[in-house]
């Protein structure tokens, strides 16, 4: 792992993903995850303060993050968390869990960065209970053709600085293609450059 991935990218993610409009979406969607919860692309633990409290808090959270240098910045947030969390260095393509064990799976600004995203989503489908919910907040393709063209132009360079982040994926279509039914979907731009801020957020269940 190079200097940038070890020392720079974790801080970039910790700062860029902590912006208020993103926190507001976290606050709206993350509390939907209860019971036995899996979070993929845990990052620096920015979702931790947004899980429910009291009866609504997760019974446990398995947090997968393949980049240990990124997860290392979650220390303080983990120390303040009042439910059991296990952080495991793993990608979502091979989830270290049995079939149908999670009540909820959470993915925020992560599907953009997964190499084999279709495979990862099939894994999510495997580990989620038939009654479970998949809560997602993701960025992706702009609905404006001109901006989508820019996203495609910028993507190769953006992937280099953004830890493999794709700009032009369609999270909702990918989720459906992997065997989920999207039961809630809201979309829209967040403040910031239009090529990186169109978000898809909602809830999916197993088909
Ligand atoms: C933009 S960051 C978002 C972090 C966090 N989910 C958040 O909302 O703040 C994308 C994260 O996806 C992680 N990631 C990259 N490849 C992955 C994979 N194959 N499986 C799971 N997570 C992955 C990165 O290491 C990084 O932490």
Image (spheres, rainbow, N blue to C red):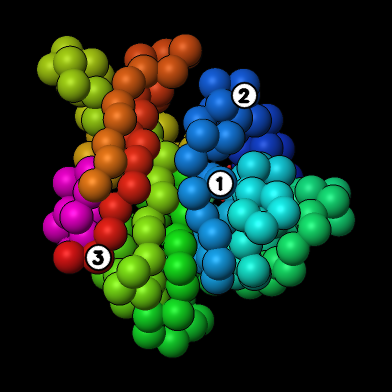
- Based on the displayed image, in which of its 4 quarters is residue 117 positioned? bottom left
Element class at badge 3: strand
Q: Earlier in the sequence, mark 1 or mark 2?
A: 2
Residue 113 higher or lower than 85, as above or below: above
Q: Earlier in the sequence, mark 1 or mark 3?
A: 1
Q: Is residue 28 left or right of residue 67?
A: left
Pointer 3: what residue? 206
| CA distance separating discs 1 and 2 | 18 Å
Badge 3: how crowded within 10 Å, few (<14), some, or many (20+)? many
Q: Is residue 66 left or right of residue 166?
A: right
Q: Nearer the viewer, residue 32 or 118?
A: 32
Q: Which residues are magenta?
A: 172-182
Numbered circle sitting on residue 31: 1
Q: Is mark 3 within 8 Å of ligand 1?
A: no
Q: Given this view, does label 1 or label 2 mark the residue nearer the observer?
A: 1
Task: Estimate the x, y position of residue 194 in percent, counting from the top left.
Answer: 35, 15
Q: Nearer the viewer, residue 87 or 81?
A: 81
Pointer 2: what residue? 19
Q: Is residue 152 visible?
A: yes
């Amino acid at each position: 792992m190079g200097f940038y991935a070890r020392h720079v990218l974790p801080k970039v993610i910790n700062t860029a993903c902590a912006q208020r409009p993103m926190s507001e979406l976290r606050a709206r969607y993350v509390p939907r995850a209860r019971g036995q919860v899996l979070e993929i692309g845990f990052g620096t633990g920015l979702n931790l303060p947004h899980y429910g409290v009291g009866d609504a808090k997760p019974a446990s959270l398995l947090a997968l993050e393949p980049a240990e240098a990124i997860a290392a910045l979650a220390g303080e947030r983990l120390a303040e968390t009042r439910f059991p969390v296990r952080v495991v260095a793993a990608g979502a393509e091979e989830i270290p869990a049995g079939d149908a064990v999670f009540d909820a799976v959470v993915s925020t600004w992560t599907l953009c960065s997964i190499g084999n995203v279709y495979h990862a989503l099939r894994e999510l489908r495997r580990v989620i209970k038939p009654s479970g919910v998949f809560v997602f907040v993701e960025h992706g393709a702009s609905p404006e053709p001109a901006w989508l063209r820019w996203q495609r132009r910028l993507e190769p360079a953006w992937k280099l600085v953004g830890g493999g982040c794709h700009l032009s994926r369609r999270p909702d279509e990918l989720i459906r293609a992997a065997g989920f039914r999207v039961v809630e979907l809201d979309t829209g731009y967040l403040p910031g450059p239009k090529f990186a801020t169109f978000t898809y957020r909602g809830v999916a269940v197993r088909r």
